[in-house]
Amino acid sequence: MDGLATPRSLLCRGPIADTAMRIVSIIGARPQFIKAAMVSRALRKRHIHVLVHTGQHYDANMSQVFFEELDIPAPDVNLGVGSGAHGEQTAAMLAGIESVLLQERPVWVVVYGDTNSTLAGALAAAKLGIMVAHVEAGLRSFNRTMPEEINRVVVDHLSALLLCPSQTAVDNLAAEGIARGVHLVGDVMAEALAFAAERAGCRSPLLARLGIAEKSYLLFTVHRAENTDDPMRLRNVLRALDALQEPVIFPVHPRTRKAIEALGHRPAAHVRMLDPVGYLDMVRLEQSARLILTDSGGVQKEAYWLGVPCVTLREETEWVETVQAGWNVLAGTEIERILRAVRTLVAPTTRDHLYGDDKAAERCVALLEAGTPQGR
């Protein structure tokens, strides 16, 4: 729904108690839709929840389909900001979110992950004196050249409630002097993946449509600015794909497609470039791949949970536990390192249960209900 009008019929399911809080969630990118889906489902049972979409991802395959597949109502507000330079995009989001918050006057603003939408939501709320809860707090790559790292650090220092997916995240915050309001809740994406994986097997016909068999291909995704905005790094990754001697399925982010076109690169015949796919189709591709190559944090986790080896096209990861467990290898963007990783990575015979269970969303809601963390 466009504009600032918010039909109250969309805000909750069932009767709302006198103790209900008004809570606003800010989302804008695909991973946030997935995380917010689980938290929103738990919140709307007993609270007034307003879902604000900044419009950072605005293509139907990058946005609308996720709400349909995860069984959550459409956003109550869509700011329609779209793409743009970091400063321009964040400023537009900040202005739009501030207008919504002035109208809604929520008790909490919930932000997710590490995008410009996350930063704008936290800044707008903090400047209005509204408490901020950060889902997926405490992650660090320790690489300040990443825009996402700047967003994480700033948002964590603005937040009253820091909802961490791992003990490593808790420890990162402690190292920065943040200990109050910090809680280990697990990863809400684990619950979303379980929900989607159950549906994907029977509802996603993508493998049949592509004419590929399970475990007969590699899945590849790349979207981070450090890779797509650097012609040399992107060219190296694409050349590594061309040098592989097995089928590669490549759902292409719109920004990545533009960067590839600017390079004038034509992939080898075994590399199949697809338009962005919905969440169920993506989960189907992940669970059926022999191996995944990616620079996405979310895909790294999903690969681990699904038991699929992963090669990460970065020099560091926020999800260090997946590397320590032997299921994920950091290969950077050097051609030979990528090829060696793909050809030699063998999945371990064991896989520990990382990042919690399917109760993370309920834990988040319980902590929001508990009110202002003491001493924060």
Image (cartoon, rainbow, N blue to C red):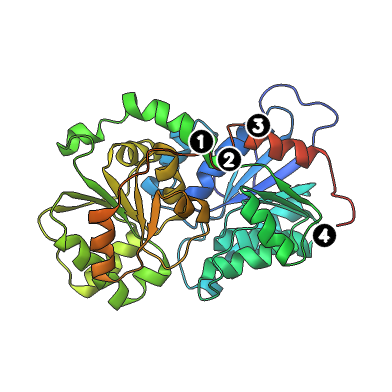
Instruction: Name the N-terminal-most of marks 3 and 1.
Output: 3
- Marks 1 and 4 sit apart, C-alpha to C-alpha, by 31 Å
70 and 228: which one is in front?
228
Residue under the image location 23 percent in, 69 percent down: 336
Q: Which residue is mark 2?
A: 188
- Kindly report which numbered mark, 3 or 1, lies closer to the viewer in this rendering: 1
On the image, the x and y values in percent for residue 299 come to 41, 49
On the image, the x and y values in percent for residue 305 come to 45, 39
Q: Which corner quadrant of the image does residue 344 belong to?
A: bottom left
- Marks 1 and 2 sit apart, C-alpha to C-alpha, by 7 Å
Q: Secondary structure at mark 4?
A: loop
- Asked whether the beta carbons under mark 2 and mark 4 sit within 8 Å of each other, the answer is no
Type of amino acid under label 4: Gly
Instruction: Name the N-terminal-most of marks 2 and 4.
Output: 4
- Marks 3 and 1 sit apart, C-alpha to C-alpha, by 12 Å
Mark 4 neighbour density, 10 Å: few (under 14) some (14–19) many (20 or more): few
On the image, the x and y values in percent for residue 197 come to 41, 31
Residue 42's label in the rendered image is 3
Type of amino acid under label 1: Ala
User: Is residue 319 something one can see in this rendering?
Assistant: no
287 and 160: which one is in front?
287
- Asked whether the beta carbons under mark 1 and mark 2 sit within 8 Å of each other, the answer is yes
Residue under the image location 56 percent in, 70 percent down: 142
Type of amino acid under label 2: Val
